[in-house]
Amino acid sequence: MPELSINALRVVRAVAAHGSLSRAARTLGYSQPAISRQVSAAEKAAGQPLFVRGVRTTPAGELVARFATETLTGLDRLDERLDELAYGPEVRVRVGAFPAANAALLPFALARALEQQPRLTFALTEASSPQLVHQIISKRLDVAVVASGPGLPQPALEGLRIAPLPGGELTVGVPRGHPLAVMEGTVPVRELAHASWIVGKGARDEPQFGAWPTLTDPLIAFRTRTWHSRFGLVAAGLGVCVIPDILAPVVPENIALVRVDDPNWLGRSILAVTRNDGGETHEIIVRALRESFEDQQRR
C-alpha cells in the first residue's frame, strides 16, 4: 500500500481548511492539477475517498486532515528544536525608535545584529521619544532609540541605562543644482533666511522636523506627514527641508545634503535606552546601532 507523503498531508490539510482546490493551490504555491494529483495519491494511500466532489471532507478525510495537522505541527517543532541545538535558542527582541531613526538607522543596525546572532527575531515599534521611554519602563520594549535636545519633549530617563549614539547632526536637503548645493564647505545659516521650507506634519504632541531650528519667521511652503513626501517635494524644486544625518543612507540621489554653520544651534543627541536588567542581546543591538552608522559614514 502506498504511504501518505508529507506533501500529501499538507495538501489534505489545506483543502480541508479552505474547502477549495484552487484556494489550497494558491496557499501552497502549487498548480491546481498538482493539488488534484496529491489528493488522489492521499486517497489511494488511505484506501477510501477523503473528499466528496473534490472539496467536502468525508469522515476519513476529517481523520486524515486532523492527523495531518498534528503531524505537521510536530515536524515544525522538530525543526525548531534541531535549529536550537545547532544555533542556540531563538531570541525575540522588542525594539522601538522615533520615525527618522526607524527609517534608516534601525534597519541597518538590525541587519548587522543578525550577522552576529542569526537567531534574533524582532518586533518593531515606531513612536515619539517619550512614548518609547514609557514602553521601556513598562517592559513593553527592550531597546529604544530616542532623541533629546532643544525643541524636543525631554523623556524621563532616570533609572534607565543610556548609551549615546552618533548621528544627532542635522543637514538641509536641497535639489541637486540648487545654489546651496554647489557652495563649498558648510553653508552659513544666514543663507537659509529666505528659503522655502517643507516641514513635518503630525499630531500636536508629536515633535516634527520643521525649518532650521534657529531661524525666526521661516517661510513654510508645505507641511506633509511622511519623509517620502518631503523628499519628493524637495526633488521637484518646491523647497528645502531639514534632514537628520541618520537618514542620509535613504535620501534619494537627486537631493543634496548641505551642512550648516550655525553657532547658535546646540545640537541634538540620539540615545539607545534600555533597562538596567538588559543582557547581552541588548548590548549587541546597541553596538550594532553604533557600528552601522559608522559604516554608512565611511561609504
Image (cartoon, rainbow, N blue to C red):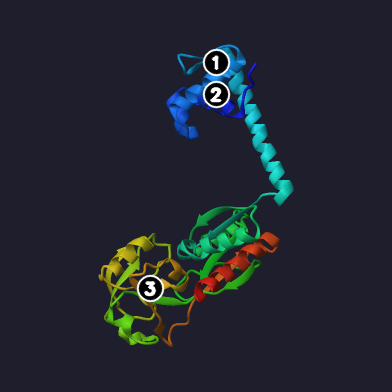
Residue 197 visible in rendering: yes
Relative placement, left or right, of 178 versus 68 is: left
Helix, strand or loop status at disc 1: loop
Q: Which of labels 1 and 3 is toward the front?
A: 1
- Residue for badge 3: 242
Placement of 282 over or under 61, stated as above or below: below
Mark 1 neighbour class, 10 Å CA radius: few under 14, some 14 to 19, many 20 or more = many
Estimate the x, y position of residue 83 in percent, counting from the top left.
Answer: 69, 46
Q: Earlier in the sequence, mark 2 or mark 1?
A: 2
Between 138 and 114, the one lying in front of the other is: 114
Relative placement, left or right, of 206 versus 120 is: left
Q: Which of marks 2 and 3 is nearer the N terminus?
A: 2
Q: Which of labels 2 and 3 is toward the front?
A: 2
- Residue for badge 2: 12
Helix, strand or loop status at disc 3: strand
Q: Give, as a three-letter code, the residue at label 2.
A: Val
Residue 278 visible in rendering: no
In the picture, the disc for residue 50 is 1
Q: Residue lying at the far right in this picture: please name it.
A: 85
Task: Kindly identify the residue that appears in the image at 51 percent across and 76 percent down.
Answer: 298
Task: Kindly identify the residue that appears in the image at 30 percent across and 78 percent down.
Answer: 217
